[in-house]
Amino acid sequence: MFFFQLEALANALLTDDILKLKGLRRPSCCYLCNDFEESLDHLFFQCPFSQQVWFGLLDQLKDLKLDGTLSICWLDWYEAKLSIILCIVAWFLWISRNQAKFDEIQLVVKGTKTNCTSYIQKLIKHYRFNNICLNYAPNVNENMLPPPLLIYWTPPMPNLLKVNTDGSYSIGDAGIEGVFRNSNGKCLLHFYSPTVALDPLEAEMPNICWAIYIANISKISNLVVEFDSLTCFNILQ
């Protein structure tokens, strides 16, 4: 969306009018309405299809107006910290245009408007900006989430070294890694390697064994091993 926004504001989207400036002259037709030549302003604002999307969306938003070209509206809404809404609507209109042009999909205004509304509601849900939708009430449970839990690394006691190990696993791929640090948090050595494992436990346990083995051959005796697998911990106990 970010790069799309930059291209739109710089009149660099490959609409038919831009292609003509590049020497690619051909009959032009808006793929959203099939009635007018395609240009940036027509595609996002003047097209009957786009206007239906805009008016249907603005009916659901609080105190927002659409007036002028894309760049003028972007500047006006930027002051209200809502310029991203212009980008969202233009983005889904551009997707609809490409679906009609390249995939010959029959477009429905309601589908494009629903995509815009759903994306805006996601931003509201995740607190990117305040609730500006008239008919959107976040679920009560969304506002009752527990506060985030702070997880931080604790250095070992003086004269001790700590190794933090972790194993990664996905179907057909696994890996092991570990980092040795002193009481000042300085990294002294580390290891990592791909491995073969049938499940996450099989990636975690060899990781711990390798950490102890490397500590042994490195003459490290005062060692703390830290990992995040409760199953491994119970096995070792």
Image (cartoon, rainbow, N blue to C red):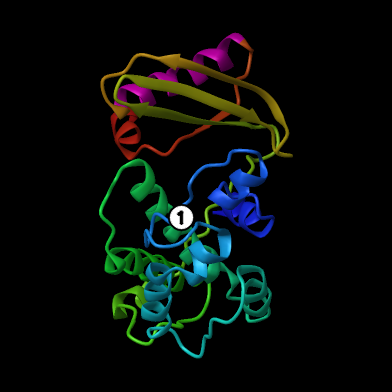
Q: Quadrant of residue 169?
A: top left
Q: Quadrant of residue 5?
A: bottom right
Instruction: Please state which of residues 150 and 208 is positioned toward the viewer in this rendering.
Output: 150
Tell me the SS state at disc 1. helix
- Which percent across, then down, holds residue 123? 46, 68
Residue tagged 1: 94
Point 57% across, 41% down: residue? 25
* Residue 32 percent coordinates (x, y): 38, 59
Q: Is residue 91 above or below residue 163?
A: below
Amino acid identity at mark 1: Trp
Give the answer, above or below, for where 124 lies relative to 225: below
Residue 197 found in image quarter = top left
Is 182 in front, or is 16? Answer: 16
54 or 80: nearer the eye?
Answer: 54
Asked if one can make out residue 83 in the rendered structure from this viewpoint, the answer is: yes
What secondary structure predominates along the stretch shown in magenta? helix
Q: Is residue 71 left or right of residue 105?
A: right
The answer to whether any part of residue 154 appears in the image is no
Asked whether 231 falls inside the magenta stretch, the response is no
Quadrant of the frame with the C terminus: top left
Residue pictured at 66% horizontal, 55% vertical: 11
Q: How many numbered circles does the render carry?
A: 1
Picture coordinates of residue 30, whole percent (x, y): 43, 57
> What segment carries the magenta color?
201-217
Q: Residue furthest bottom?
A: 63
Taking the spot 57% from the left edge, 46% from the top edge, the residue there is 14
Q: Position of residue 110 (x, y in %)?
A: 28, 69
Residue at 37%, 58% (x, y): give it.
Answer: 34
Q: Residues within 10 Å of mark 1 (few under 14, many from 20)?
A: some
